Image (spheres, grey):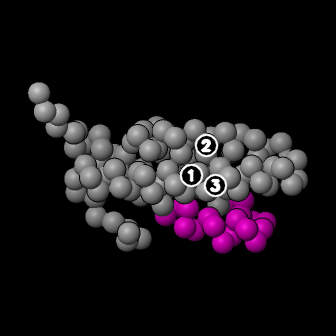
Amino acid sequence: MAIWPVIEDLEAGREATRLAALWAGVLCFLSAVVWLLTRQWFMIPAFFIYGVAAWRLFYGSLAWAMAAFVLCALETLVVLITLPVVWSVVMPFAFVALINGVRGAVAMQKYPEITKA
């Protein structure tokens, strides 16, 4: 998979959203681990949003792709300010994958699947 894939059809959009779903799942897992280790209350909404976004991104939801991307963008800003080691390694990859997830979800809306009658 390329860092910035060309999304010209439904299958490419589906592949991009599924990769974004995988990254949202990774961020959900890491948010849960951070919450278990530190008991910081603000990690609970991140854990929930990433978990639901991973599930819904697998099916091409544009709204949840945007929610995961916005949360990732906000966390990236926090990472740039505080520089925790785990997040600074993971966030660039997750950020790009979630951008591609938004692009893939838009493509899935643009190129509807043709069903056979």
Taking the image as shown, residue 13 lies to the left or right of residue 113, namely right
Tell me the residue that label 2 is attached to.
51
What's the CA distance linking mark 3 and mark 2? 8 Å
Q: Position of residue 84 (x, y in %)?
A: 78, 68
Q: Quadrant of residue 78?
A: bottom right
Q: Position of residue 69 (x, y in %)?
A: 53, 51
Contact? badges 1 and 2 (CB < 8 Å) = yes
- SS type, badge 1: helix
Ranked by sequence position, the earlier of labels 3 and 2 is: 3
At x 73%, y 68%, the residue is: 86
Tag 1: Cα neighbours inside 10 Å, few (<14), some, or many (≥20)? many
Contact? badges 3 and 1 (CB < 8 Å) = yes
Ranked by sequence position, the earlier of labels 1 and 2 is: 1
Disc 1 residue type (three-letter): Ala
Tell me the residue that label 1 is attached to.
24
Q: Is residue 45 above or below residue 33?
A: above
Residue placed farthest to the right in the image?
38
Tell me the residue that label 3 is attached to.
27
Residues shaded magenta? 77-96
Asked whether residue 83 is in view, the answer is no
Disc 3 residue type (three-letter): Leu
At x 30%, y 44%, the residue is: 108
What's the CA distance linking mark 1 and mark 2? 7 Å
